[in-house]
């Protein structure tokens, strides 16, 4: 393990200044990512860890208006605290389900919301420092997963350069809900829609988000769905004991007069980023709930997949996962 300096700044501005000034510095909050990547896997070697766990960034509150409420989540609020929040239980069941499916209670009591959204992929080629080919870890080295065992990897947003799947369940649910991320850097604060935070691998798989080095997520705003919205998060995995998703679906729909008037859909476990299925949403609006409409939406959601030997099954699995989630959400579960 590489030796590192440790700092605990008094405020967010000091934290940003410390990390921005050192290209090898990183933030420390719950510590679950650093523990895996630095201590267990030896994939990263920060020379300085800047502890933000005691900064006043842990509050969860309802803001906005009575007709358009927004849940503001501090970046260092824990997953468990968010899952237990009354507004999440009452109005955001897909968020609660994603949190509960994402980690054990022990991890949820440590892991923070900001850290969860920025967690690195669980691709074994990235996590194993002995693997020579990983464009995320060593740009230009290739992607070992393309030719090797790749069952847990992505089929959407993937390319020969990288097929690593994004690991966050919560990010999938929040992407479906048009969450907005508040960021602070040396140039001051800015806002980034969560759907625009993540970058497809493209020619530079090692760059995963639009964040500049030193920028700090301070809060996440989640628009609370309208009364009458039904939602769920369905996760398909090899085992129920906090395994990463083979496929998942976040669904929020409004049904009025027997017709779907609004739909928000996102897929996880099958894409290099939380995958918003906007084309599928458009197909559902104005349709009556049922398998014909659901299957058409699923076909639109999983279009032009990039598969390699071992990931072909995910095409149909992703579609069936979305269909089942839509059945559950609209009461059409057979």
Image (spheres, rainbow, N blue to C red):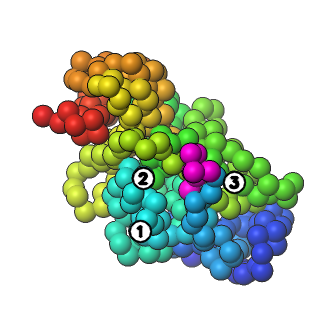
Above or below — where is 242 with respect to 245?
below
Which residue is located at x 64 percent, y 42 percent? 193
Q: Nearer the viewer, residue 267 or 207?
A: 267
> Secondary structure under badge 3?
strand
Task: From the viewer's side, name the closer residue of 126 and 234.
Answer: 234
Which residue is tagged 2? 91
Q: Is residue 264 visible?
A: yes
First in sequence, mark 1 or 3: give its number. 1
Query: Which residue has dot 3 on it?
Result: 182
Q: CA distance from mark 1 to mark 3?
A: 22 Å
Judge whether residue 70 is colored magenta: yes
Q: Does 225 sit above or below residue 109?
A: above
For the N terminus, the image quarter is bottom right
For the record, the magenta segment spans: 65-71
Bin the neighbour count of mark 2 within 10 Å (Cα to Cα): few under 14, some 14-19, many 20 and up.
some
Q: Nearer the viewer, mark 2 or mark 3?
A: 2
Q: Which residue is mark 1?
A: 84
């Amino acid at each position: 393990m590489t030796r590192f300096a440790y700092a605990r700044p008094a405020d967010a501005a000091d934290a940003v200044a410390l990390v921005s000034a050192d290209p090898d510095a990183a933030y420390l909050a719950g510590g679950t990512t650093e523990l895996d990547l630095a201590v267990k896997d030896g994939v990263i070697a920060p020379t300085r860890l800047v502890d933000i766990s005691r900064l006043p960034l842990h509050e969860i509150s309802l803001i906005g208006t009575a007709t358009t409420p927004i849940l503001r989540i501090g970046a260092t609020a824990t997953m468990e605290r968010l899952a237990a929040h009354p507004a999440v239980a009452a109005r955001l069941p897909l968020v609660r389900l994603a949190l509960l499916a994402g980690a054990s209670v022990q991890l949820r009591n440590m892991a923070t919301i900001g850290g969860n959204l920025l967690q690195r992929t669980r691709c074994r080629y990235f996590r194993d420092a002995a693997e020579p080919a990983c464009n995320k870890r060593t740009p230009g080295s290739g992607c070992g997963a393309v030719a090797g065992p790749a069952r847990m990897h992505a089929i959407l947003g993937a390319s020969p350069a990288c097929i690593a799947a994004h690991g966050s369940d919560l990010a999938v649910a929040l992407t479906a809900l048009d969450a907005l991320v508040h960021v602070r850097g040396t140039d001051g604060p800015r806002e980034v829609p969560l759907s625009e935070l993540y970058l497809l691998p493209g020619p530079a798989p090692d760059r995963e988000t639009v964040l500049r080095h030193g920028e700090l997520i301070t809060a996440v705003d989640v628009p609370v769905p309208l009364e009458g919205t039904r939602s769920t998060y369905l996760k398909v995995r090899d085992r129920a004991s906090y395994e990463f998703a083979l496929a998942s679906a976040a669904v929020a729909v409004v049904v009025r007069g027997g017709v779907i008037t609004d739909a928000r859909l996102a897929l996880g476990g099958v894409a290099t980023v939380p995958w918003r299925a906007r084309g599928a949403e458009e197909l559902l609006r104005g349709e009556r709930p049922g398998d014909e409409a659901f299957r058409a939406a699923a076909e639109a959601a999983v279009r032009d997949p990039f598969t390699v030997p071992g990931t072909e099954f995910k095409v149909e699995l992703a579609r069936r996962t979305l269909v089942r989630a839509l059945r559950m959400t609209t009461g059409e579960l057979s």
